Image (cartoon, coloured by chain):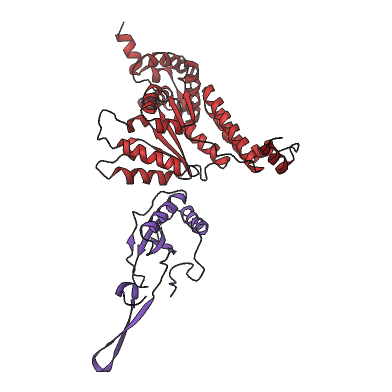
Amino acid sequence: MRLTQGTFSFLPDLSDAQIRAQVDYCLGKGWAVSVEYTTDPHPRNTYWEMYGMPLFDLRDAAGVMDVIDSCRQAYPEAYVKVNAFDASHGWESLRLSFLVNRPANEPGFHLVRSEEKGRNLRYTTMSYAVTGARS
Amino acid sequence: MSEAAARLDAATGSSELLDLDGLYRQSNVDTALAALEGELVGLIPVKTRVREIAALLLVEKLRRSIGLEADPPPLHMSFTGNPGTGKTTVAMRMAAILHGLGYVRKGHLVAVTRDDLVGEYIGHTAPKTREVIKRAMGGVLFIDEAYYLYRPENERDYGQESIEILLQAMENHRDDLVVIFAGYANRMQTFFGSNPGLASRVAHHIDFPDYTDDELFAIAERLAAGMQYELSASARAALHEYIALRRAQPNFANARSIRNALDRARLRQANRLFAERAAGITREALVTLEGVDLRASRVFQARSVTP
């Protein structure tokens, strides 16, 4: 199952040149770009691992591309995303976040039913990548 | 006809005229060169070298535009000269020139010293240096007093690690980064001598000569005009004497010493005006630096004590 998450999620995967152009746009706006990765792509999982510190004071995308490449090499089977944080007053939040790497095999999610009191059913989604059940 | 020449002929038609002048005007390099020429006093050898480099890069760009292939020209430089001879200023202009010619994408200057590159404990240096390199990408990395990176007397010094990472970046990111090493001439020589890998990657060595007394006076006039001050006749005479005296004293830093002297003269002028405030102050008095403002300097006192 192809994961769709973040900006550009319904487009085909961005090429390196397109990623560079996006990062250049972010840096031009003065946003701090950071790279994060995870093996648990649940949509509610907001705590991805940081790959290095956020990159402050950059002027050119080359530095970010460097970090993206080394993250992809270190974790080829993880999801990797690029975040752009706007620190300006009134925003102080992420302005852009998109995937730049996905594993070759994306197992997707399964549904867990749990029976509650009074014949109620509760549903939750779990990533196969976390439970390791199916591939 | 050789094979390469035949290829060239096929590619362009060898007699066709190419518009070097058009490329020059469109690249905005002339404004950067004019700024270099107009804003900086003296420094003739430096200006000549910068012009030569700009011409080389421009011709290289023209060659590439008609499909002639050559490795991109090496751009890493070393600026040597005494303090206050304008190394940082020229580096800034250089960044603008390289940007105008499209050799660096953003054209900003990141000025660092040893403190910004070398860490305090094991494992701290590499990320620190890499971060600085990332910041400088797309622009020019200016390493002031670069020889402090290498301390042969301490074999456990982290500077060497920083140099190795720099070398790697200069090699792998040739399109992203231009590095300028700066410092005093003789110490830079030992630095390059003990780091042959670094020396062989630095293509352009530019030496910054000391300013003459007349050039320093011209610089002082420009600085004063820039701060909207005027020098009275007595101040001019005092300044001429000041320059000659200051040069003989230790820690003379060329244009920087002159700037400091003017800053202190402003301070004394303000004090003087404040003391005379009861009499009322004219606009002229407000913009004029007098001889007494300069002559109160320690530099003159030293002379009166010594003989």
Identify the residue at the far bottom of this view.
Answer: A118
Judged from this view, the residue extending furthest toward the front is B2
Viewed as shown, does residue B170 lie left or right of B151? Answer: right
Q: Nearer the viewer, residue B152 or B105?
A: B152
Q: Residue furthest top?
A: B307
> Is residue A32 something that shows in the picture?
no
Looking at the image, is A65 positioned above or below residue B300?
A: below
Above or below, A121 relative to A72: below
Looking at the image, residue B153 sits to the left or right of residue B274; the answer is: left
Residue at x 42% of width, y 42% of height: B169
Q: Quadrant of residue B286?
A: top left
| Residue at position x 40%, y 38% in the image | B167
Q: How many marks?
A: 0
Residue A78: % across, % down: 37, 64
- The chain painted purple is A
In x, y percent, where is residue B260?
A: 39, 26
**Most foreground residue, B15 or B238:** B15
Q: Quadrant of residue B141?
A: top left
State whether residue A87 is above or below residue A127.
above
Picture quarter with the N terminus of chain A: bottom left
- The chain coloured red is B
| Residue A54 appears in view | yes
Q: Of residues B152 and B132, which is closer to you in this image? A: B152
> Is residue B29 shown left or right of residue A60?
right
